[in-house]
Amino acid sequence: MKTSGFLVFMLILLSGFIGLNGYVRSAFTPVDSLNKQIASLKEQAREAKFKQLLAQDSLRDFQAQVATVLPSAIEGKSIEEAYPLRQLASVVSKGDALNIERASSAFEKAKRQFRDKHFEDSEALLGDLIERHPESTHVIEAHFLLAESQYQMGENEKAVGTIETMISLFPESELTGFSLLRLGKIFEKQDRLEDAADIYKAVLKNFPQAEIARQAETSLKSVAL
C-alpha cells in the first residue's frame, strides 16, 4: 500500500517536472530571447536619441548666446585682445560644418572603394570613419558597408562582430535588419541552420519593412526546419 502511494507520488512529481521543463523551453527559446533583446535595445535607442536631441538643443542655445555676446565683448578691444574671442566665434560657427564636411568626404571615398570591390580599402576607410566621426549621419551606413566588406573578404567573425555592434547601437535602423539577414546567411554557411532560422524569425517580428520581410520569409523557407 505504501509502495503504491509512493509510486503515485513519483508519477505526479515526474509529470509536473516534464510540464515545467516544457514551459521553460517554450518560454525561453532563442528567437524569443533575441526578440526581447531587440525590443530592449530599441527602447534604449529611443532614450539615447532623446538625450542627443536635448544635447543638440543645448549646443544651439550656447551658439546663439555666443553669437549674441561676442560683438559687444570684442568692441573696443585691441586686435591682440580680440583675437581669442574671434577664434572662439570661428570654432563655434564653423567647427561643426567642417567635421560634417570631412565625414561626408571620407564616407564617399569609402563607398567608392566598396562599389569598386576594393573591400580591404573600404574596410580600412570605414573603420577610420566610424572611429573619428561616431556622430556622423553616415555612421549607420558605414557600419553596414563595413560588415559587408568583411563578409565579402571571408572575415566572418569580424562581420558578426560588426553586425552585433549594429544591433546594440542602431536596433531600429532598416540597415540593421538587412545586416541581420546577412548574419543568418553566415550561420547557414556554418551549418547552424537552427540559429539562422531564429535570426529570420526575429527579423520578421522586428522589421516590418516590405523588402526585409520578403527576404526573411524566403530565407526562412530555404532553411526548411
Image (spheres, rainbow, N blue to C red):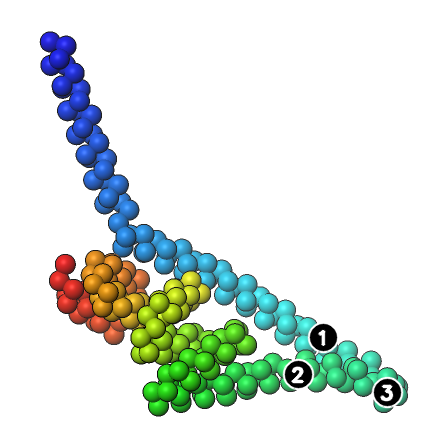
Which quadrant of the view contains residue 154?
bottom left
Rounded to the nearest whole Å, what is the CA distance between mark 1 and mark 2? 12 Å
Could you tell me which quadrant the N terminus lies in?
top left
Say the numbered circle drawn on residue 80.
3
Q: Mark 3: which amino acid?
A: Glu
Rounded to the nearest whole Å, what is the CA distance between mark 1 and mark 3? 23 Å
* Residue under the image location 26 percent in, 41 percent down: 24
- Foreground residue, 223 or 214? 223
Considering only order in the chain, which callout, 2 or 3, is on the residue closer to the N terminus? Answer: 3
* Residue under the image location 41 percent in, 60 percent down: 42
Considering only order in the chain, which callout, 3 or 1, is on the residue closer to the N terminus? Answer: 1
Q: Is residue 202 visible?
A: yes
Rounded to the nearest whole Å, what is the CA distance between mark 3 and mark 2? 21 Å
Position of 76 relative to 219 (above/below): below
* Residue under the image location 42 percent in, 65 percent down: 165
SS of the residue under disc 3: helix
Q: Mark 2: which amino acid?
A: Ser
- Determine whether, in the image, residue 48 is placed left or right of residue 205: right
Q: Is residue 205 visible?
A: no
Residue that badge 2 annotates? 93
- Label 1 packing within 10 angstroms: few (<14), some (14-19), many (20+): few
Residue that badge 1 annotates? 65
SS of the residue under disc 1: helix
- Foreground residue, 8 or 69? 8
Mark in the foreground, 3 or 2: 3
Say the numbered circle drawn on residue 9.
none
Horizontal and vertical percent for residue 139?
A: 46, 76
Mark in the foreground, 1 or 2: 2
Which quadrant of the view contains residue 208?
bottom left
Q: Mark 1: which amino acid?
A: Gln
Horizontal and vertical percent for residue 172?
A: 38, 66
Which quadrant of the view contains residue 110?
bottom left
